[in-house]
Image: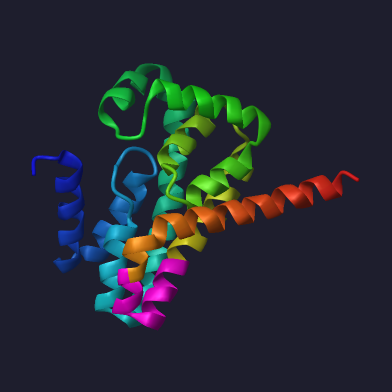
Amino acid sequence: MNNPIRKTYDWTLSLAKKKSASGWLGAISFAEASFFPIPPDILLIPLCLGAIRKALFFATVCSVASVLGGLAGYAIGYFAWDELQPYFYQYVPGFTEEKFGRIAEWYAEWGWPLVFLAGFSPIPYKIFTIASGVLGMALLPFTLASAVSRSARFFLVALLIAKFGEPMKEQMDKHFNKLALLFGLLLVGGFLVLKVLLKH
């Protein structure tokens, strides 16, 4: 009952009832890309259900705000990580020194496909936005990978809700993380196959 993550989840869900819900959606999408623990889908889904004709508008708000938040995360990593890392390890769910060290190793091998996968899947996007800044990933590939993956995720959610309504919400609540991870892996796998083919 006293789980702070659960309380934050319930608070995020309650924002759907507010007149300023679309503004909150943008704020949470921005914050989630660097430190906030709850994904914006939690708010996006009930907003789309409550105003199906505005589903694409809500997806646009999510996408734009999340990409901007990703750039803020990149800036934290690039300019201020040495000073801020103890606070992230202590207070931000998903951040550990072990995970961050492992991601640094992965970057040397994979680079931007990791950002794409994190942007679409349930993998904590914030870890990768900050890691991209810390490790000096080129800004243009980072921004493009973020924009495509974040937009694909949020527009997919909005379109499914707009088309199928409440039954789709129930199925997405149950299976979304598995489906998103599978789809993201397939997309990244396709890019990697293309990369290999282009070398020959």
Q: Residue at x 20, y 55 (%)?
A: 12
Question: Quick check: is 167 in the magenta stretch?
Answer: yes
Instruction: State whether residue 19 appears in this view.
Output: no
Residue 74 lies, in percent from the top left, at 47, 35
| Furthest-right residue in this view | 200
Q: Residue at x 20, y 65 (%)?
A: 16
Residue 61, picture quadrant: bottom left
Q: Residue at x 57, y 41 (%)?
A: 114
Q: Residue at x 24, y 57 (%)?
A: 24
- Coloured how? rainbow
Instruction: State whether residue 65 appears in this view.
Output: yes
Comparing 4 with 182, the one in front is 182
Question: Quick check: is 165 in the magenta stretch?
Answer: yes
* Magenta range: 156-170
Comparing 157 with 23, the one in front is 157
Comparing 71 with 151, the one in front is 151
Question: Where is the C terminus found, in terms of image quarters?
Answer: top right
Q: Main secondary structure of the magenta part?
A: helix
Seen in the picture, residue 1 relative to 130 is either above or below; the reply is below
